[in-house]
Amino acid sequence: MDTIKVLVVDDELGIRASISRILTRLTIVIPEHDSEVNFEVETAETGEQALEMLRAAPPNILLLDNKLPGISGIEVLEEVEPLNLDMHTVIITAYASIETAVRATKRGAYDMLPKPFTPAELKGVLEKVTRHLLVSRRAKELAAEKRKVRFQFISVLAHELKAPINAIEGYLRIVKDKSAGDKPEVYEELMERCLVRTEYMRKMISDLLDLTRIESGERARKVETCNVTEAAQEAIHTFAPEATKRDIVIELHADKPVEMKADRTELDIVFNNLVSNAVKYNRENGRVDIYLTRDNGTVIITVKDTGIGMEEDECKRIFHDFVRIKNEKTTRILGSGLGLATVKKIALIYNGDVSVTSEKDKGTTFTVTLRDN
Ligand SMILES: Nc1ncnc2c1ncn2[C@@H]1O[C@H](COP(=O)(O)OP(=O)(O)OP(=O)(O)O)[C@@H](O)[C@H]1O
Ligand SMILES: [Mg+2]
């Protein structure tokens, strides 16, 4: 239950009393905002008194008579304009001329209520203003939330990009000062490490671009019938050299070609990330098994590995941006922690999802479901 503060400004006692009576008994239900609204009413007889009250504690809604004994309603609005109050104003006036309406609107009035009005007309206007007030309140909350998420994202990003720069700087200083002795191979090794870190930064930046393009809807999508089996095969091809180096076998199990309506690049991103992880976090002589099925319009992709595995609480965190599990088995493996977050965002575009089951030191299985786009 929300309580909305209303200030009624009118020189006629009868009007002040009747508006107060109606509003204090009124409850407006707004189902789309899931809220019930009550009103708390204060009154003022003159513009001068209203100004004092507005400066002290502004209401949510101001019901303001224009024709007052001292300064007029519109003059009150002009006075408080610089304060930029978060308030919705309805001008009550017996002289509902176009000119008054224009002047009032210029000063930020939201609506007009011509005198004399019936209780139903008053309720109608109140309902309209309340709806507007709730919509703009919600929009402000959303904007604040968005700013916060953006800030968090940028802080983590800055932190993640600083780490490789610090490392590269450290290595370059050693090289510049020649502080690691006379052996050239030591310096070659340091330069090699610099290159690895630069490559990692480049990957991080391109992952980040993928992610932000997908999230913002900026990437031009091309939805067509795609061969999912072929996308899986290509990802296997990409990671085959790395797998062979560590004697890892990758096998694809798909009874027949699986097809779906999708953007091929998005499918590639999903497979590349899942297969990359299954190889990266595997053991020597390990296996990666990929299963593809299409069931009732849903494509199910399962990628199973025999790698290092994860604890249950770790499994819950890995779909968030920049999350990497840090332990002795992963310290030497580079990554941005954006891969699975991107997979999840893509799955959601396809009304699907991604889930994981894992056992420490035994292996991990990721399952992605996708529906035709
Ligand atoms: N198959 C897997 N087996 C074990 N741990 C995994 C597996 N896949 C992901 N993880 C854990 O989840 C974390 C997040 O994975 P994600 O793919 O999002 O990022 P990443 O691999 O670290 O970096 P990149 O952005 O380069 O993919 C990894 O750092 C790793 O700790
Ligand atoms: Mg990854």
Image (tube, helix red, strand yellow):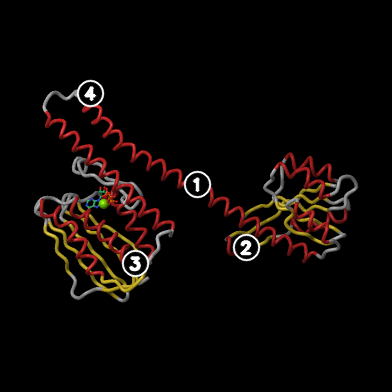
Q: Amino acid at mark 3?
A: Asp
Residues at badges 4 and 3 in contact (C-beta under 8 Å)? no
Residue beneath label 1, please? 147
Q: CA distance from mark 2 to mark 4?
A: 71 Å
Q: CA distance from mark 2 to mark 3?
A: 40 Å
- For marks 1 and 2 on the same chain, the one whose residue lies earlier in the sequence: 2
Q: Amino acid at mark 1?
A: Arg
Instruction: Assign the N terminus to one quadrant of the image.
Output: bottom right
Q: Secondary structure at mark 1?
A: helix
Closest to the camera, between mark 3 and mark 1, is 3
Query: Which label sits on residue 30?
Result: 2
Query: Which label sits on residue 177?
Result: 4
- For marks 4 and 3 on the same chain, the one whose residue lies earlier in the sequence: 4
Residue at x 69% of width, y 62% of height: 128
Q: Secondary structure at mark 2?
A: strand
Instruction: Assign the C terminus to one quadrant of the image.
Output: bottom left
Q: Is residue 129 above or below residue 370?
A: above
Q: Could you classify mark 4 by the number of other residues whose Cα lies within 10 Å: few (under 14), some (14-19), or many (20 or more)?
A: few
